């Protein structure tokens, strides 16, 4: 009996160890996939940002041709900053991106916190706007209308038989209220 209990305990420990290894493998695989996605996305965004820098340079050149040297210099400086950002995004891998973001957060905690606050506000505004639309859609789907009638924005429509008579949606006395309709001849 003691041998059986020991065997069961060993088998249970073995199963726990196998489950732990499977969890570690799954976590490692998920991390690798996330890193690959970050690397791909950062390269794509870097190329887009670099393209934007080229567009800003074109604007600067156009301003220069119009004789507006000061705005052209500002556009050129902006293009240089944007191009550096694009190159950093394009050339950095996920580890470098995370490391640089962490370093920035340590050097500039208030800027980092304000950036997080701005993102939070933007996300809440987006959720509020989309929740209003979802609420209105849900209300329009859940509002029952009498079959065959059509209602306008003022709640008055045509009768269910389509005769064009205003129909307010209120049933005749005794109908639709749970009361039994009167029967003739009784």
Image (cartoon, helix red, strand yellow):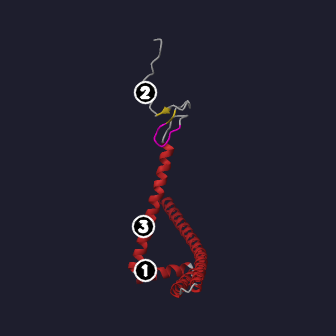
Q: Residue furthest front?
A: 67
- Rendered position, 174 above or below 146: above
Residue nearest the observer in this picture, 144 or 87: 144
SS under mark 3: helix
Residue 12 inside the magenta-drawn segment: no
Residue 181 placement, left or right of 90: left
Q: Return the x and y of residue 141 as percentages of the image width and height.
A: 51, 44
Q: Return the x and y of residue 63 as percentages of the image width and height.
A: 56, 83
**Residue tagged 3:** 121
- Rendered position, 159 above or below 43: above
Magenta range is 150-156
**Residue tagged 1:** 105
Q: Are marks 3 and 1 in contact (CB under 8 Å)?
A: no
Residue nearest the observer in this picture, 141 or 152: 152
Name the magenta segment's main secondary structure: loop
Residue nearest the observer in this picture, 50 or 64: 64
Spatial CA span between label 1 and label 2: 67 Å
Residue at 45% over, 82% down: 104
- Identify the mark nearer the N-term, 3 or 1: 1
Residue at 47% over, 14% down: 184
Spatial CA span between label 3 and label 2: 50 Å
């Amino acid at each position: 009996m003691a041998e059986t209990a020991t065997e069961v305990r060993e088998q249970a420990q073995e199963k726990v160890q196998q489950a732990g290894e499977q969890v570690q493998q799954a976590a490692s695989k998920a991390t690798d996939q996330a890193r690959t996605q970050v690397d791909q996305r950062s390269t794509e965004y870097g190329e887009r940002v670099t393209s934007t820098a080229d567009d800003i340079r074109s604007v600067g050149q156009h301003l220069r041709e119009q004789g507006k040297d000061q705005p052209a210099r500002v556009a050129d400086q902006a293009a240089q900053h944007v191009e550096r950002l694009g190159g950093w995004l394009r050339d950095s891998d996920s580890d470098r991106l995370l490391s640089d973001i962490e370093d920035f957060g340590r050097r500039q905690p208030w800027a980092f916190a304000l950036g997080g606050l701005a993102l939070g506000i933007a996300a809440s505004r987006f959720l509020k706007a989309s929740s209003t639309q979802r609420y209105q859609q849900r209300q329009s789907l859940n509002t029952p209308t009498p079959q065959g009638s059509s209602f306008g924005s003022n709640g008055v429509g045509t009768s269910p038989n389509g005769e064009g008579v205003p129909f307010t949606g209120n049933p005749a006395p005794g109908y639709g209220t749970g009361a039994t309709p009167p029967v003739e001849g009784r």
